[in-house]
Image: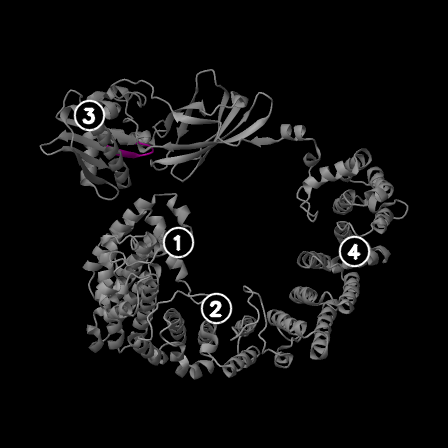
Amino acid sequence: MATNWAERISAFSRRPSGFLSGTTAEAFLAELLRELRDDRATYSVKILLLSPLCEHPTLLCCSDSVGEETALELMSVFAQCPPKSVQFRCHLLLALTSVLICTSCVKSHSRASLDFLDVLLQIAQDTSDIHTDGSQRPLRAIACECLRELEACCPGLLSQRLELLGGLRQQETSRLHQAYAELYTLVLRNAIYQLTQDTGAGAEHLKALLGGNTSAAWEADQESGLASSKDSAILSSLILGPMGTVPTLHTGPDCKELRSVLSTLLDDSYLLTPLCQATLLHRLTEVVAMVPGVPPAIFRTHLLRLLGTSEVSLLHATLLLKCAFTDSLFSSEDEAFILKRLVVLSQHLLLSTPEKLFYMDCILHFPENRPISCGDGDETLPVLLTPQLASALVPTVFNDSATLLARFNMLSLVYLEEGEEGQGGQGLAYLYEHLSSLLSMVDNGCSRELVVTFFRAAFLFLYYFCHMERYSNDLTKQLCQLYLNHTKLAPHLINLADQTQDRLSESSWSVGLLKALQRVITEAPLTSHDLSRHLKMLARVAEEGEIIQQSTLTFLSSIITPSSSSLCTGGDWRLGNDILRVCRRLLVHPSLDSLLTPLADVLQLLVCHYADMEIQDHARLYYTLLTTLSREKLAGVLAQGMEEGGRQVKKQSLSCLMGEGLTSTLTIQQTERAVFRLIEAPPEPRAGDINSNEVEKGPGEASASVEAYREQFSDSSFASEITLQYQLVHINSHDSHFDQLFSIRLHFSLTDHHYEELGDISVPCLLRERPSTIVHLTLKPRKPYPTSLHASAIFTSPDGRTWHTTLPDIHVAFQQTFLPLPVPSNWGRGGRLSVFEGLWDEICSESGDTAMSLFCCQLKEAALNTLVEKHFLPFLISDPSHKEEFKVLFFLPPRSHILLKVSSEEDAVHFNIATDNWELLSHINSYLLKITSLQEDTLS
């Protein structure tokens, strides 16, 4: 069993949706809960069973009511679990927390969530293990974590227990002191935030909150005590920076109780781990920011320890303090010290690369006491970061890529502010020299990572210093020479030109680079190895309307003229497409009038001499367009396949060059809304006796038995399909264009794995003025569960166009899977009764997948008879005239049975249910509830 569950849980964890397509969430959840209640299962297996509830609670508990019921079941298991099973009890608490939070039971104050909260508080208060072996401490630690998660998801949930939690924190002497401190700090912060939202709250309310007098503290909302969902989003972080606003609680100077609590928390903070200390400092920073009556100087005694820390989390908490209180807490000397420390840490040899990058990012977003800029998140340097201080962070070729780029970016900002005079000019010269060194390394051959690093550094340099022509022009020359030496870098150069043009729209550097590349390509000696890359580069050059394209056409003519080149005779398809790409861009160039003759000559050469037929056809099409359409119409036709700005061709099909009418005729159109739908057709009349699902005649009634019935399961003619009737009808919204539809092809797709794939169905026509067409839909169940089918169709309209439409989903109800008992026709009613009794006895005596159940309802005798005649008659085994007990048998393909014994008792009508597939119980229960409720409503 353990191995089987391990495989199933592993399959669920790998692909939950795929796993549930073979069953239902309700069935799988029922299996999990049943196994958790089984005393024979080991605790290691039960811990494994809890993992789906911890990881995917919303998949298994699809509604709040299901989550509530699941939580009550888990708490029942927890109550019955012996105290020594600490690990299993811990996992139970985690599963309960996940279920209650994810199903919104906590926010709605459901009974299960309140009971669970009491259980967690009782565990947290149980300190009896302090003087023992401490075996229960893991359980208390998990209880604190669960309470903290509940409070974080529903701020204010524990605000009325603040004094209790404070007492637990103070009396805890074990390592669990940290868990209690984290929980108390979070609850304190959320409770004070709630007070700030009450316009009438003040010092007395704060004092009552800390003293446990919740009736005085929570006058506004005694029942819920929860922040709204909007508040929950705000509570993610209250520190908005020196220019932001924080909700405040006006208490005046009388806050000695809160100051005492904060001082105690800060004094004890050194006992916590660095990460926990940082979290506590963050929360206390928010508390002090919300209560102006508490001065930020309360943190002063701890600044020395914080400023000298080597922990990333604590230094980050210190910067948050500085962001919140600026010069109210930090002097100018403190600010200078922190900045110098960040510079030192950014180059410390013993720190990892991610840590050093974090410290450099802190410098770029340094919270100054008196910031000059108030940009929203822009990278700005602090005033105190001088070129002399930043010189320690100059990039070198020995830096890794990320560090090199981060330093290059920071130094660019430093020297940009300094200008070209003095240290700024020297620094800028150094940066360009460093960029040239990277270029030399790329030119001499290096890794792909270094190539990418160089081009990113080049972009950064241009982003900041593109206006300095001395450097930008020289960089253009070096890049052109680099391209000639390594034409494989063409994609990088094109990307550099694109990004520079996008980010620096006012600069003409990108156009200058492309113009220079055009010149070196057309003037350099040609090699076949470089030709494809040259053509890609020239295609990008042809996008720029400012660049004259005469030299490009001369280059194209020289490479395809038969007398000077063998390119055409070779017929390379890829090279031919590269040439056509350049020609296509030239067809929409602003100076096309001056390019008309040479471009036509190039296209004519391709038509006449290129060995590939497809290239000839495309060239002939371009030549025809060039010589027959005006420039405006030509641009309009070709622009359909280009993005705005002409940068990338989206489609290169002939259909985009054809007229709209021809295109619409050759393609499938999509309807805006559904044109028709399938509705369930009235069932065909069938006899009162159950003869509609008979198999071929077999032995007579005397030989009828459950054993003989079982032998039919191996018969290929045994019933395994369900045929459903639907009417294909027009949607009510009238559209005369679709009154007559022809050659309809219906396609169905499954939403789960409960049925075999369905084939398409053809319908000759659908005419609005004629009766609706009957469609027979054949289903082959793997598991006879309710399902939904997606449906779509392709059809032809009278004007000859082909359309695709999506139909409303088809819902297959559970009762539509019912078939009568498939037995030979000559068995008679007596033979069927024999099979019924035999199956009933088997189900009562066997275990495994079989199950028994009872459904009760209030129905009068007349109502019961009507219900049986309306819903059960085709499946009735017993004589309809015998009203004392009705015996009903549903056969559900491929191999399932549901047996009913329906009788009127003194108190109610009893539906005794037996089935050889226990997973069907929930479905038959829902079905019986539905038909009995409808019967009651009809009679009333």
What is the C-alpha distance between the residues marked 1 and 4? 51 Å
**Residue 234: % across, % down:** 41, 60
Quick check: marks 2 and 3 in contact, CB under 8 Å?
no
Which quadrant of the view contains residue 524? Answer: bottom right
Label located before the other in sequence (1 or 2): 1
As shown in the figure, which amino acid type bears the numbered disc 3? Leu
Residue in the picture at 66% in, 44% down = 650
**Residue 886: % across, % down:** 17, 27
Q: Which residues are magenta?
A: 892-898
Q: Nearer the viewer, mark 2 or mark 3?
A: 2
Which quadrant of the view contains residue 876? Answer: top left
Quick check: marks 2 and 4 in contact, CB under 8 Å?
no
Work out whether residue 910 or residue 399 is closer to the camera in this orientation and state it. 399
Q: Of the numbered discs in the image, which one, if any, rests on residue 241? A: 2
User: Which residue has dot 3 on it?
Assistant: 939
Q: Is residue 854 left or right of residue 250?
A: left
Does residue 305 appear anywhere in the picture? Answer: yes
